[in-house]
Structure formats: structure tokens, C-alpha cells
Amino acid sequence: MARNHFLHACFYTVFGLASHMAFAALQANSAGLTEPGDEWLNYGRDYTEQRYSPLETIDTNNVDKLGLAWSYTFPTNRVMESTPLVHKGVMYVTTSWSRVFAFNAKTGEALWEFNPEVPKEHLINSCCGPVNRGVALWTQNGETSVFVGSFDGRLIALNAETGEQRWSIRTTPENSHYTITGAPRVVDGKIIIGNGGAELGARGYVSAYSAENGELVWRFYTVPGDPAQAQESPALEKALSTWGGKWWTVGGGGGTVWDAMAYDPELDLLYIGTGNGSPWNRDIRSPGGGDNLYLSSIVALRPSSGEYVWHYQVTPKDSWDYTATQHLILAELNIDGQQLPVIMQAPKNGFFYVLDRRDGKLLSADAYAQVNWASHIDLETGRPVENPVADYNKTGGSLIWPAPFGAHNWQPMSYSQQTGLVYIPAQHAAGYYSKDEKFSFTKHRWNTGVDLWEMRSHADPVIAKATMDAIVRGYLTAWNPVTKEKEWEVEHPEASNGGVLSTQGGLVFQGTGRGEFRAYRADNGKQLWSFGTDSSVLASPMTYAIDGEQYVAVSQGAGGAIVLAVGRPRPQNSNNPNRLLVFKLDGTQTLPPVLASKAAVRNTYEPLNSASRELIAQGDKLYERNCATCHGGSANGSGVIPDLRMMSTKTQSEFVGIVLGGSKRHSGMVGFYETMDFAQTEAVHAYINHRAAVSLEEEEYSWWDQIRYWFWYYSARLGDAFPWLANALRDANMSP
């Protein structure tokens, strides 16, 4: 017996040492060093993508002394989603339009700026604005390069000291509808980059380029092409049997790799998360049925060759825009007495997945948010057990949780080695799905196969506002991946909030959509500190140390899909200042004042005051299909892009020239002459002015509107708990 105990002790000692060594390898980083230490060298800090820092100078006992050390106001006013990197005392950060800035990370001195001069006209190919999430670093022969993916599809290498361009290559077809918004990754001298654009008709792929000269090393397509043609890999030949119809002609298939990646150097596996189908509706995309591989999947590849190794499909036959492009995290977890190497994800579909990253075996999958599209994930088959409500093509339309924005979107989560918890910037909202009976693929437009007019909460502005206020919200959710339970949760009034950082100091940092940057206790979620910002904080924080002093940095600037499409203005961001905020203990700096904006005035256009109800109704549907994804559903502007209800008399008179002629294309507003005619443009114009004349502010409500507001608010809250009731109420009251 003693001998057996001794052997067991030896085994676990050796196993523990091996696990520690493997984990140390995971903490390697893109700059070719062994451990980032005081620096932040990769999008998720190191290869694990945990966004966990061992720095502990700032902790639960002194975080209340955190103050602004320095800040910088960028010459942009769109969304900020970048995570800064810090190497050798220099900070590298990106803004919208793929601009790159370098700063002295201690003093905030601006060192250089690089502007790739992205054509503003390319904005038409975007789902969510000209966003960029960061850069990658690589050091070779003592020289460090900075790599950025430009919004219009280029991969650019810069000299880290000067910002001068070393090389630039195009990663997407010329004049295509592809975009790049994600941060590159570097693995063994290869720059890994994906792209976006599924709604616009893209076929997804991920590419690897030489860090030295930009030569293409390999490319892996995530969905098959025309079956009459040879497929690019055996994996695609295998995937062909899971597709039907002519998907390559109605939207390209989708499956874009626009964000999530992680790398395990011990296993030499690169993990990518793939996106939704194009169009969303599988009955249009693939009417012959099938799971449609490798949509909405975690795929493991060999980084040297792009060779397929394994996959796990998170949402088979995705019809709901349930991407698996959300943040991937590598960790070592003790599951049922075994120390296992795992990969974790909280994708859009509302279930938290833990997989064995060696072979993709499903270990657990449990709901971390409200879900009604599936009852559970069958651990034997690894497949969701769908509820009848999920098939909106058969039901005629259904209110489904989560909404297309997902229970978790692009904002990165964090795993704390200290608490063993995963901190998820979770979202709560339902989406009404119904088939677009008049679908036809249209270039430069969202091709979802779902009726976007029906998808909004309600045509009546009072009911729409009440519904949105009641059910659209966000959470910071602390999830235990071992016990598969929520440890704690903080509710936010906005659905879209910031990414997360956890530290050895027992802290969790997150920004909010309402313009706060907060610190919480990692063990119980108690808020310990906050800082008021001038705009939403959606980007992920990071931390670093210089000369023994710890800093915490985060970018501010509202925008993104939810903010633009939902159209819920933030009171702080009329000018939406884009800033970098850097904090330290006893920091004494203050934010510069925000320039006052012009008073917003609703200006109806006299020639359209007599527009008929029929014309307004026509404009309503045309607006939702062509305009809502940028200018907000029901013409409710977000404050990031100009609110069309506030058009000046000059803009009113130029409306047709702007919308059809593209007179403001150099500002990103291209002409719609390919898809709309003069009469349709006038219908949209009439609808916008009709909406300008309708009061949306609660304090302006009549007594009857106030009664209706609160009735529908509480009805929506009740429907939130009983989805069948929410569906019934919506169906009964959707007419304008």
C-alpha cells in the first residue's frame, strides 16, 4: 500500500511538473519572448488569451486610490475596440479606420502615428463601423515590427521605432466586400489574419503570411465553394456533404474568421472561431439541409501549414447569426480529478463550452444566459436539442433568446488563475426571427434571409422604447467552468459593455456602455472603484508595469453593432470623444473638457409634411433594410452616427443626392443607386421626417403614452420570464 502511495505521489509530481511546463509554454507571446512579465505582448496578453495579469501592486485594498495618470484624445470619433500592447516601455494602440499610435507608456508622450488611409467608401461593406481591435508584435534579429490589419483588407508591417511602413499586402480580393477588424496573431514567424463580411456575401477564410516579407504561407477556407470545382483542402471535401442548394451564389456561405484565435505551442495547434452563415437563414442558404461545416465552429489547425486537425461545431445548421467568433481561452482545469488542457468559449448562442483542446472532445456545455432556441446540449452527441420555436421558417416567426447580437459578442472575457472563474461580458435580449419572403442577394447590403423590419421590437415608438428598456441589458457574469455555475453577476442597464481584465491583485476591471470604468472584487463582484468617462467604454482593459509602478489602460468610444442598430443614445457621447485612458495609484490628471455639440433640433421637411400613410409605411420597410444597421432601428439614432431625425434644412434639400448620388461618399455614405430608385428614396425621406415628428422622450409623453409605456414595460418584463407570452404579445401588437 505504501509503495502504491509512493508511485502515485511520483506520478502526480511528474504530471504536475509537466503541466506547469506546458502552461509556461502557453504563456509565450508574439514578440518571441518566454513570458510577458510586466508587459502586454499579445491581444489577450499571451498565447492563453486569458487576459489575466500576475501584477498585484494595485489590489483590493488600494484600488480606490486609482487615478488618471495620462490620457490622449484621438482624431477620430467612431468606436474604440482596441487593446493596447506594451513592449520596452512603448504602448501601441489602434483606433477606428485602422490608424496606429505609439506612446511612451509611462509619460503618455506621443511617439508616432500611422494612417493607412482607408477609403471612406469602404464603410458600405461594414456591419458595425470601421473598427479595429489592435496590433501584433514580432521581434527578429533585434528589430521589432508592428502588424495591423486595415479595414479595407490589407496586412501592414511597421517599424516599431519609427512607424514607417515596411511592407503591405492585400489579404482580400481587390474592391471586395471583405473587411478586417480583428487583431492579427503571430505564431513562429507567421502573421495569422482573418476577415469579416459574411452578411455582405463573403466566403470565410484565415491566412498566414511571413512576418519577414508578407508572402502568403497558407490559407484555410472555412466553408466549401462551388462543388463543381476542386476544393482547397480535404477538410472542405468532407464538408461538402453537409451543404445543400447553391450557397455560393446567394451569399458565399459565410463562416468568416473575424476575431477569435488562440495558440497552444505545446500541442502546436492554432484554434480559430468561425462566424455565421451567409445568409443567416439556412433554408435559403442550404435548402437541402445539413449542418453546414465549418460554420459557427471552433477549428484546430496546424500553424505551419494550415492543415485541419479537428473541429467542434458550436451551432450546427446555424440560422440565427450565432457565431463562434467570440473570445477563446486556453487553461488547465481539474475536471473529475483529472488535470486537463481545455479551450473555453462563451459564444453567441448562450451556452458556455469547455473542450479538451487536444482533440475537441466536449467536456461541458451549460447555459450562462437566457436561452430558448435549445433546451440543452447533449453531451453524448455534442449537439444542441432544439426547441420548436427555433425553426422560424415553420412557425412563421418567433421571439428567440438570444438575439442576433448574442448572449456574448466580441468583447473579450477573462479567466483568473487566482479564482478559477471566467468573467463574461454577457448580454440579454431576444430577437424576433421570421423568413424574408422576398429575399434576393443584393450587393453591398445585409443579406440575412430574415425580415429585418419584423425583427425590431415594435413599430409603435412608445411600445418599442418600453420593450427595449425592459429586456435589453447587460451583465458581468462570473462563471465557474468546473462547477458549471454562476458564482456572481452584476447587472448593467445597457446590453453592450466593455471587455474584461482580471489580475493577481484580486480585481476585475470592466467599462460600461453608460460611460464608466469600474473595478470589482474578483471573488464576489463587489464594486470597489469607478471613473466617469466621456463616452462608452467597450474595449478591453490591460495592465503593465514600468519601474515598479503598475498602470491600467483602456480605450473609450461608443459604437459597434448593438449601439448602431438598436439606436439607444448615450447621454455622455454627443461628440463621442475617442480617448486612451491610463491609470495608476495616486494619479492626479483630469480629462480635458468635451467640446459642446450643436443643439439637436428636429427639423421636418415641409415638402413631405403631407406624405401619405402608405408612403410612410413603404419608407419604413425600406429604411429598415437599407439604413437601420448604421442609423438605428426605427430611425432612433445612436449618437455615434448623425441622427437622421435631426437633419438640417440643407441636408433635407440634398437628401436625394446624398442617398442616390453618393455626394457624401468620402465621409463613408455611398450612393444607393444600385438598389433604390427616386420614388423609394422619397419614401425613406418621408418616413424619417415622420419619425422626427413623433416624440420619443419620456418627459414629453402624454398621460396616455405614459400609461401605455409602463403597461408595455411590465408586460415585456413578464414576457422575459415567459417567452410564450412575449411571442403572443408581440404578434398581437406589431402593426404600425
Image (spheres, helix red, strand yellow):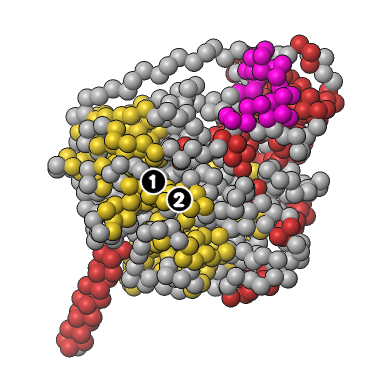
User: What residue is shown at x 28% (from left), y 22% (from top)?
Assistant: 590
Magenta stretch contains residue 652: yes
Quadrant position of the C terminus in the picture = top right
Q: CA distance from mark 1 to mark 2?
A: 7 Å
Q: Residue 204, image x and y in percent?
A: 59, 58
Looking at the image, residue 31 sits to the left or right of residue 171; the answer is: left
Q: Amino acid at mark 1?
A: Gln
- Near-viewer residue (311 or 670): 670
Looking at the image, residue 497 sits to the left or right of residue 317; the answer is: left
Vertical arrangement, residue 216 with respect to residue 489, above or below: below
Local crowd at mark 2 within 10 Å, few (<14), some, or many (≥20)?
Answer: some
Question: What secondary structure is the stretch in magenta mostly built from?
Answer: helix
Dot 2 falls on a residue whose secondary structure is strand
Q: Residue 622, image x and y in percent?
A: 76, 34
Magenta stretch contains residue 397: no
Residue 39 has which mark?
A: none
Local crowd at mark 1 within 10 Å, few (<14), some, or many (≥20)?
Answer: some
Residue at the farthest left position: 547
Magenta-tinted stretch: 643-667
Residue 165 has which mark?
A: 1
Residue 168 has which mark?
A: 2
User: What residue is shown at x 36% (from left), y 62% (from top)?
Assistant: 189
* Quarter of the figure with residue 74: top left
Q: Residue 134, image x and y in percent?
A: 40, 45
User: What residue is shown at x 74% (from left), y 66% (from top)?
Assistant: 244
Vertical arrangement, residue 249 with respect to residue 405, above or below: below
Inspect this view and state whether residue 562 appears. Answer: no
Quadrant position of the N terminus in the picture = bottom left
- Near-viewer residue (275 or 16): 275
Inspect this view and state whether residue 156 appears. Answer: yes
Q: Are marks 1 and 2 in contact (CB under 8 Å)?
A: yes
